[in-house]
Amino acid sequence: MDTETETETVPNPGLARRSFLRRVGIGAATVFVIADAGLAYRAYDEGVFSEGHGPAYDPLRSWPDLSGPEAIVGSAILAANAHNSQPWAFGISPDRIDVFADHTRTTGANDPLLRERDISLGCALENMVLAARAHGYAPSVRLDPPGGSGLVATIRLASGPVVRDRLYEEIPNRRSNRSEYTANRVAEASLAAIGTLADDAMAPARLHWLTSDTDRRNFADLLVTATSAHNADDDQSRDSFAWWRSSWDEVQAHRDGLNIDGVGLPPMIRTLGKILPPTERASADSTFLDRTRVQAASAAVFGLILVDEPGSLHDRLVGGRLLQRTHLWASANGLGFQHMNQITERIDRDHQLGRTSPFDAPLEALAGSPSVLGAFRLGTPTIASLPSPRRSIKDVSR
């Protein structure tokens, strides 16, 4: 985990220029000159030399120092979630934590039936259970309790043994890896190990693997087609772009959303992308499609989360727990993991608009079931993931 802190408060154009040249890999055979000190300043100002730094990343650094119920919530806010929208809030008591859906943090047309929001809350729940055990609690989880006002789960905290397993230790290191993956296959032993991760508390969530070349190719084609449909849907395109943070200042102000550091691009391209003018929506859509083609084609394996009732809050929460646990296992074992939600987002959008989705039948055929909740890809990444910004415990507490 990165524990460095920023000490520079005044940009140094000369230092910025030299650092930039090192970042883009300038060698003896290459001539690259930044003649304008203003450009070097823009590089500094846009966070070219500040990846993973600033207040937006403090929750990752402060995580080891938390204790009690705050440690549990501190782990929850580091969970995987759609568009990094962080759609959660927490009521914290000494012997209980209430988990709420934050209705103000939806992704609009990209999640019209709130599937992704509920899966994200399930991911946070899994981190909370792992953290509670690691801090000497025996957590008791109740899903979808009465109470309304967005309350989705309650965790009661009784005293218990301290259990710090490998998945818990991986919480601050877990990242979505959106880079191209290598041609290396995921070992059958790894898939078998992941298959044992679901416990009774996660029933009826289960895993289904797409390992054959034909299934992987067909699912990859569906992903690309769904992404094209997303871009053609003005509401989905607009609502997705609303979570894009173009500058270092935006990242620090919002402490959420996606930014160029998380796209899985090589360092040189990330650097240039920050120096160039801010991304426009059409360009973001084009990049989204291009990156999906790369990601889909390079997946070593696709995994599907199946449940009995994809529209049920209970099944969505337990499916999110399994998704998070699988992601933590992948991170602990050096595998890249990326939640691939384009197909299910398009299915829910079509259903919201009152029509049968062209993705319903192909997805059911691949899964052998009509009950796909979510999907992800696994593989060996070519580029290490960078941390994503997070809101503080104070920001998410009720």
Image (spheres, grey):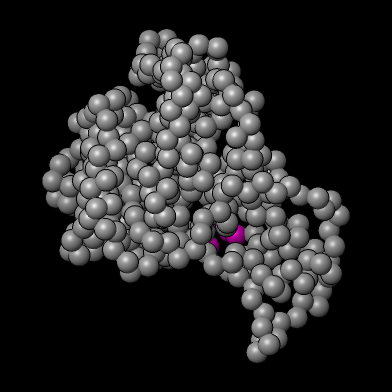
Q: Is residue 358 magenta?
A: no
User: Is 212 displayed left or right of 112 in the figure?
Assistant: left
User: Is 229 displayed left or right of 103 in the figure?
Assistant: left
Q: Can residue 83 be seen in this view?
A: no
Decide: is 353 above or below 187: above
User: Residue 171: horizontal and vertical position, in percent?
Assistant: 49, 39
Task: Out of 371 and 357, give the one closest to the viewer.
Answer: 371
- Which segment is the magenta one? 279-283
Q: Is residue 384 visible?
A: yes
User: Residue 155: horizontal and vertical position, in percent?
Assistant: 43, 17
Total labels drawn: 0
Task: Out of 187 and 367, give the one closest to the viewer.
Answer: 187
User: Residue 137: horizontal and vertical position, in percent?
Assistant: 46, 18
Q: Which residue is drawn at 17% across and 47% down?
A: 367
User: Is 164 displayed left or right of 201 in the figure?
Assistant: right
| Residue 395 occupies quadrant | top right
User: Is 278 displayed left or right of 388 in the figure?
Assistant: right
Q: Which residue is drawn at 48% across and 21% down?
A: 136
